[in-house]
Image (cartoon, grey):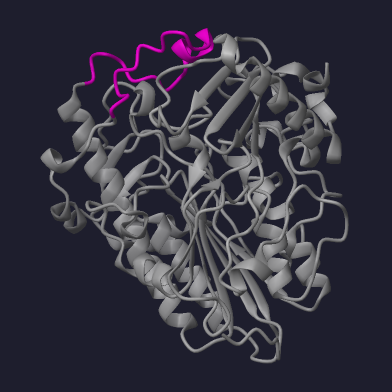
């Protein structure tokens, strides 16, 4: 392994939206076909236990880019065009991203795909060399929608698009009839354009932001032949009655109605997995373009997808399917091949790790830590607790904007134990070793009270490090 740096490496961060941690061949799936990502994992490092910092899009993305938990970066809920300038709905301009630092270090920085952190059409936070973003909320013109118009193809991402299927409130899906209708393909086309424009003497940072497999799920029909409904494995917790769990979960927006049959859900799953295979195909195109260059490639998802766990689709809950994500790092001749990291990786750790590879470090205190030295040497990083934070479901889905609603839940995972402090509901404690499906909340069992007290102290220490900001309630 060559650990000496002769010139600054290029960095490509490929971020999906709502991809499950286990929905890939490299993650152990015998169903999902991801040959290009499997090769990426074989050529580098796979983090088997990576967690997002918040199981919802904007706060999670802000944490991946800043190395800060939501209480510190203050992007507390999803951004949307009607929320411009509202507290908690955008990433403040004084929060420093990885691109801010790389830009000052001489990198050419670009983004393709959703920004989702405020002012979607305004180049910002270091991404000033190539700002090729699109909005995906609302029916109005943007670069992606304009592309569909220019190409003369139907825009299947419009809310009233024909031919879509949705069972109850599960993930909406359909097929494309023209390759130009697929947004991941568009994102990879523009990403390859960015790379091919590059001056060989200037390092670059590309944030390839892929909106899929977030619904609407639109799939090239030929990929569906790889997946059979009868092969789809329904989650063991699919019909979880949520006994002994916080009552707010019962009114979750994406709780699967009892009218949705298992066979219907399995059909939807075939589209979800086929879309991941499409993502894999498109990522393979970008990887081929990068072949022979001095480039670090990171592949992650902003957060996970419940896909039937506990009777839900989507995210926003602290269950494993929602908070765990796939995470790969590859850097030829510098990182070991086929190295499996079992130590949990926090949703704030990737930013400082990528900076370390470039010989840089954050300008200001952050929550994350670099694991670059450990993994370059083929060593497991020292284990440490993992945290996640999120606003209430009322704030995320039902427009509640009271300040306390923007900071409602905080999770810690320490070893086999997961504790969730819920501001307005009962708390949760799960033994991930004996109860990996998180069916039994044991928070009220007396033998765990000392452990819970300790985990509460760990949360207080964490939020006090760069906050506590709106999570001051956990200190009381």
Determine the residue positioned at 80% across, 66% down: 361
Determine the residue positioned at 46% across, 59% down: 147
For residue 277, side relative to residue 447 (left or right):
left
For residue 413, side relative to residue 146 (left or right):
right
Magenta-colored stretch includes residue 40: no
Extreme-front residue of the structure: 447
**Image: 440 above or below 437:** above
**Image: 347 above or below 314:** below
Magenta-colored stretch includes residue 246: yes
Judging depth in this view, the residue of 121 and 124 nearest the camera is 124
| Residues drawn in magenta | 236-260
Query: Which quadrant: the C terminus?
Result: top right
Image spot of residue 458 (x, y percent): 74, 32
Is any atom of residue 268 visible in this view? Answer: yes
Image spot of residue 104 (x, y percent): 83, 72
Judging depth in this view, the residue of 370 and 310 nearest the camera is 370
Is any atom of residue 153 visible in this view? Answer: no
Would you say the magenta stretch is mainly helix, strand or loop?
Answer: loop
Quadrant of residue 177 within the rendered picture: bottom left
Image spot of residue 239 (x, y percent): 29, 18
Determine the residue positioned at 37% across, 23% down: 310
Quadrant of residue 152 within the rendered picture: bottom left
Judging depth in this view, the residue of 168 and 419 nearest the camera is 419
**Image: 245 above or below 307:** above
Determine the residue positioned at 57% across, 20% down: 393
For residue 153, side relative to residue 79 (left or right):
left
Query: Which quadrant: the N terminus?
Result: bottom right
């Amino acid at each position: 392994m060559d650990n000496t740096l002769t010139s600054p490496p290029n960095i490509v961060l490929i971020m999906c939206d709502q991809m499950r941690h286990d929905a890939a061949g490299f993650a152990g799936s015998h169903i999902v076909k991801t040959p290009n990502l499997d090769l990426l994992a074989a050529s580098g490092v796979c983090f088997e236990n990576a967690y997002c910092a918040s199981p919802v899009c904007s706060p999670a993305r802000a944490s991946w880019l800043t190395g800060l938990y939501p209480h510190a970066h203050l992007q507390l809920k999803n951004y949307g065009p009607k929320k411009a300038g509202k507290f908690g709905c955008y990433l403040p301009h004084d929060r420093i991203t990885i691109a801010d630092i790389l830009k000052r270090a001489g990198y050419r920085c670009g983004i393709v795909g959703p920004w989702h952190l405020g002012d979607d059409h305004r180049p910002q936070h270091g991404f000033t060399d190539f700002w090729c973003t699109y909005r995906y909320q609302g029916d109005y013109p943007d670069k992606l929608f304009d592309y569909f118009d220019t190409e003369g193809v139907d825009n299947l991402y419009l809310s009233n698009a024909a031919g879509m299927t949705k069972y109850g409130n599960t993930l909406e899906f359909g097929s494309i009839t023209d390759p130009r209708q697929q947004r991941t393909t568009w994102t990879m086309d523009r990403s390859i354009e960015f790379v091919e424009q590059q001056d060989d003497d200037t390092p670059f940072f590309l944030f390839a932001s892929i909106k899929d497999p977030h619904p609407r799920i639109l799939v090239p029909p030929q990929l569906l032949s790889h997946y059979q409904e009868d092969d789809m494995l329904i989650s063991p917790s699919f019909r979880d009655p949520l006994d002994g769990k916080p009552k707010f979960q019962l009114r979750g927006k994406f709780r699967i109605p009892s009218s949705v049959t298992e066979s219907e859900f399995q059909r939807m799953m075939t589209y979800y997995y086929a879309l991941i295979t499409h993502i894999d195909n498109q990522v393979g195109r970008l990887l081929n373009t990068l072949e022979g260059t001095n480039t670090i490639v990171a592949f992650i998802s902003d957060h996970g997808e419940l896909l039937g766990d506990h009777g839900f689709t989507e995210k926003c809950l602290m269950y494993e399917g929602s908070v765990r994500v796939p995470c790969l790092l590859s850097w030829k001749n510098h990182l070991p091949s086929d190295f499996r990291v079992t130590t949990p990786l926090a949703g704030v750790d990737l930013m400082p790790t990528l900076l370390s590879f470039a010989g840089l470090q954050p300008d200001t205190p952050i929550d994350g830590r670099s694991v670059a030295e450990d993994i370059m040497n083929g060593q497991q990083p020292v284990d440490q607790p993992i945290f996640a934070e999120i606003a209430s479901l009322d704030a995320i889905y039902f427009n509640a904007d009271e300040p306390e609603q923007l900071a409602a839940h905080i999770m810690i995972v320490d070893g086999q134990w997961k504790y969730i402090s819920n501001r307005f509901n009962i708390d949760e404690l799960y033994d991930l070793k004996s109860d990996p499906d998180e069916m039994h909340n044991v928070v009220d069992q007396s033998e765990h009270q000392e452990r819970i007290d300790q985990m509460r102290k760990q949360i207080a220490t964490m939020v006090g490090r760069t906050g506590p900001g709106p999570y001051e309630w956990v200190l009381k």
